[in-house]
Amino acid sequence: MQIVHSTAELDCVLAARRNAGESTALVPTMGNLHAGHVSLIRRAQQLAPCVVVSVFVNPLQFGPHDDFDRYPRTLDADAKLIAAEGAAVLFAPSISDMYPGGYPPATSVQIDGPLNAVLEGEFRPGHFAGVATVVNILLNRVQPAVAIFGQKDYQQLAVIRRMVADLGMPVRIEAGATLRDIDGLALSSRNQYLQAQERALAPRIYIEMQKIAAGLRAGSRDFETLCAEPRSQLQALGFRPQYLEVRAADLSVPAASLKQFVILAAAHLGSTRLIDNLIVDCE
Ligand code: PAF
């Protein structure tokens, strides 16, 4: 595996691969890799011979009260893991390499409409513009045939798909399934912020989402009532839920006639913000 820190090095490595006729799959990450990322890297390997994993904690997608400073940075361990998985390239740029025109960049990707107004978009203003901008830069730099993103960030995936469609970007976007711990907690680098007691409680989000899913499968379409009790349960346990909602697959307000739904949740537990989602097929 080649570790590259600058765009110039990246261009060199990728040009050689392209000349050898290899297509590229990109796995964008913020590092601190876990089994969820490994599954994305393995999926990438099925899709293209040259797998590039980027590791960059992108300041542009963090709000002023978010966890940018304490976000875990574990590049040495990440490099070992990525090498062991057989990826071709680890791209770990600095802020000035990622934003060569200066930080913050004067040019960014703006996300309009309901996709950016609801759920994460409502509670993290500016977040998706930051994500879309850095993903745009990464896609320009790496020019992959395919890029893989985890389904755990359901709305992020929707925003990226929409950007790629709106801007006519020549890349295929693939989703990687959410990986869960044995007790149901979705794997996330942020789980390590949880104190032991909080870690024991954290899977309740998934349990409450499953109750809503069971209601949907049983035919209930009173979405608000379905979510009210699980939301109170989480509150009673000490979570501070920001949203727990049923939506259509495209994140619009669901019609009762739909057969596919997605349940989305975000809640603070102590100093940790957890998000999760569950796709429910009632076919
Ligand atoms: O999902 C993430 O880790 C980040 O939002 C991403 C896509 C790597 C962009 O910084």
Image (cartoon, rainbow, N blue to C red):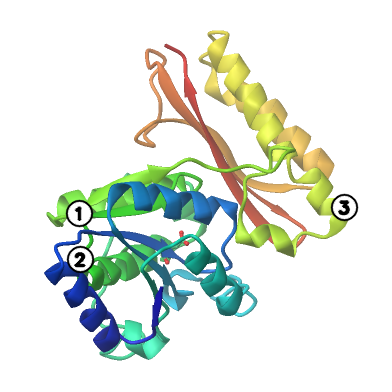
Residue at image coords 48%, 47%:
119
Q: Earlier in the sequence, mark 3 or mark 2?
A: 2
Label 2 – label 1 distance at C-alpha: 8 Å
Q: Residues within 10 Å of mark 3 (few under 14, many from 20)?
A: few
Residue at image coords 79%, 51%:
199
Residue at image coords 38%, 31%:
249
- Answer left or right for 124 relative to 106: right
Q: For this rendering, which residue is in front, 202 or 90?
A: 90
Label 3 – label 2 distance at C-alpha: 44 Å
Q: Quadrant of ligand 1?
A: bottom left
What residue does disc 2 label? Answer: 143
Eye-nearest disc, 3 or 2: 2
What residue does disc 3 label? Answer: 197
- Answer left or right for 100 relative to 45: left
The picture quadrant where one finds residue 273 is bottom right
On the image, the x and y values in percent for residue 224 come to: 57, 25
Q: For this rendering, which residue is in front, 96 or 111?
A: 96
Q: For this rendering, which residue is in front, 238 or 153?
A: 153
On the image, the x and y values in percent for residue 181 come to: 69, 43
What residue does disc 1 label? Answer: 171
On the image, the x and y values in percent for residue 152 come to: 51, 46
Instruction: Give the amino acid type for the residue marked by disc 3 in the picture.
Output: Gln
Mark 1 secondary-structure assignment: loop
